[in-house]
Every structure is written in C-alpha cells, then in structure tokens.
Image (spheres, rainbow, N blue to C red):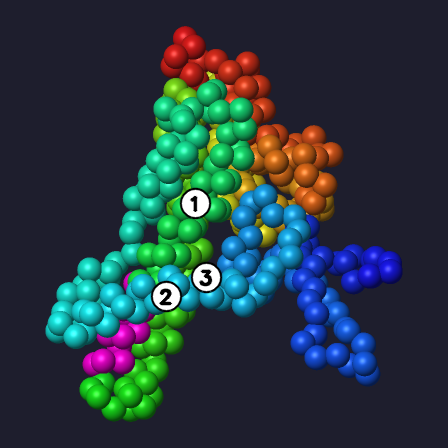
Amino acid sequence: MTRVPKSEFSCLTPASLLVGGILNEPFNGKVWYWFAVVDSASDDAEIVETIFELDVDFECKIFNPSKILKAADVDSESLIEEISLAIAMGRLSEFVASVSKLPKPEILAKEAQDLYISANGLKGLSPYEIPCPGDAVMRISRDIEFSLYKRAERRHRAADVIRIISEGGEDLVRSVVHGFPSLNSSFLSASQHRKTRAGRSFEQHISRLLRDGGVSFQEQYITSGRRPDFVLPDGDSLNSLTRSYEGALVLSAKTTLRERWKQVALEKFNCGLFLATVDDRVSSEAIDDMHQRGIFLVVPEKLKSSDDTCYHKKGNVLTFREFFDEELLNKRPGFLYWSV
C-alpha cells in the first residue's frame, strides 16, 4: 500500500482489523492484492478472530489459510472417529448423553485458571503476587478458557446435530428437512450461549482475584431492586447510613461494553463505581460519557498502554494493578483482611 486510506478507517471502532490477501490468479498479467476492513464491533470480527485464533497479544501476522483449515481438520477427524465408533457399536445415544450439557461456567473458569497458574508457576491468582493481574485475567478468559470452551462446544453441537438428524430415520434428505427447525434452534442457542458464558466466566475470574488477594467482598448482593456484581467489603457497609464515601465500593464486570455500560450508571450508592472489562473496542466518546457519570473503568495493563485503544490518555481509566494498589491497598486497606 503506497499510502494509508484514512477515510476507510475514520469511522471504525477501536481495535478493528485490516485483512488483506493475494488473488489466486493474475489479472492482466499482474499480481493483485485485496484489502478489507472489519469493524471490531461487528459479528464478522468475531468470525475472523475465531477462525485465525487471534489471541490477546495479536497485532499483525501473515497466515496461510490452507494450513489453518488443515489444523482444524485434525481436531475434527478425531471427533469424527469417536462418533463413528459410537455409531458402529450402537452407543450413539450414550455419546450424545455424555456431551448433552456444556460444562458450567464455573467449571471451565476453574480449569482455565488452573492451567494458567500451573504454566506460570504460581500458587494462586492473588493480584498482589502477579505483576499484571489484568493481563492475566484477559489471557485466561479470552485465550485459555475460550479454547477449552470451543472444544467442548464442538463435541456438544456435533452430537446434537447427529441426534436431530438420526431421529428422522435413514432418509438423510427427509431427516434434514423435517429436522430443520430443531437444527436452526440449536445453532441460535450456540450463539446465545457463547455470549452468556463469557460474561459469567469473567465474573468468576474477578472473584478469584479478589478472593486470592484477601479482599472482603460479596457477589450479586441485592439491594433496592439492584444487584451489583461485587460489593466491597460487604452489603452491610454499602447500606450503612454512617459510612464515608470510601467506606464501600461497587465493582461491575462486563467482558464487552457497547451500550450495556449504561446499566452500571443507574447504580447510585454514594460510593466509588468501578467497571472492569477486557473490551479493547470502547470509543473515546463512551469513556468520556462514563467519566461524566462517575464511572471508573478497570482494564488490563496491556490495554491501558496500547496505542490501539482509547484508554491510555483517560483519567477515569485504571489498570487492574492500579485498582488493587491505589483504590484498595492505599485508600481502603480495611477491605483487605490480611492488612488489618
């Protein structure tokens, strides 16, 4: 590219993608390249990230699509052999039953945490023993756990599709046509379940940081019809009429924000209001709007310092490191039962 086409990038969400490739066949005797922008807020971005397995550290890379598809086929072939064997032995119903339910978020979260702890030689996930706790949470939730989930999801959905089709008998065409409503419902459920799982799992990782860091907190505390994700140090302190402004703290957790952060703005408790996220797609205007409403964002250290996000020059954006050190250890040491 001889120059940057700024007009093509001007309306994109932060952390969007530029995808390019080379045409298979020369045109007019010349080799041609193609480029396309993929807005990070679109569903297309999620598809690209999933197919090419873009991790949290991704900036740019040259890919060979045929090798990526071949690697995926190795995983698929193993599953095909397993299902084929179950069919041959007359145990398809047993296999379907064994994968009929996806692992609960807390189970996947724990498995991902344990893998990260083991790989990094840690004793736990205390934010006071990890240099960049936000980066750790982002790695666990967006890379390790998602990889575990995709494997479980493939087994579950494949078995579900086979179950639906096999119920129609040996006529494959008839089975697919009559089973289409059930197939459609299964695929819609897959998309919805991914989004729900991601949010709940992120809360599990925040909870682990707080617990291993010796922070007093209550989860999903209900007060006045509202239910913040985390109340520090507890619900009684939040509702106390005699406490100071810094005598309590509300921490919400959302993997992606979009317009959902406005729900947090409704939670007025006369205390600090913090919103933890691993979303790298938040616009500058949205961050400023949060600032006006008294919301402080808590983001991974890597995202705060990155030029690809809008976080690094915003006064209401803290890293996880700053949140645990400044907001808890320095300003509210009473919230840490080991420091009392």
Mark 3 touching mark 1, by CB under 8 A? no
Indicate the position of residue 86 as horizontal and vertical percent values: 18, 69
* Local crowd size for mark 1, using a 10 Å CA cut-off: few (<14), some (14–19), many (≥20): many
Query: Which label sits in the foreground, 3 or 2?
Result: 3
Which of the labelled discs sits on residue 144, or is there none?
1
Q: Nearer the viewer, residue 31 or 283?
A: 31
Q: Please give the name of the residue rendered at 42% of the width and 61% of the height, measured from the top-left corner.
A: 192
User: Would you call the spot at circle 2 few (<14 residues within 10 Å), some (14-19), or many (20 or more)?
Assistant: some
Q: Residue at x 68, y 43 (%)?
A: 309
Tell me the residue at 38%/14% (across/down): 337
Nearer the N terminus, badge 1 or badge 2? 2
Amino acid marked by disc 2: Ser
What's the residue type where badge 1 is placed?
Answer: Ile
Question: Marks 3 and 2, how far apart in space?
Answer: 9 Å
Q: Looking at the image, is mark 1 or mark 2 nearer the viewer?
A: 2
Type of amino acid under label 3: Ala
Q: Position of residue 111 (x, y in %)?
A: 33, 41
Q: Is residue 150 magenta?
A: no
Residue, disc 2? 76
Q: Is residue 13 left or right of residue 55?
A: right
The numbered mark at residue 71 is 3
Helix, strand or loop: magenta stretch? helix
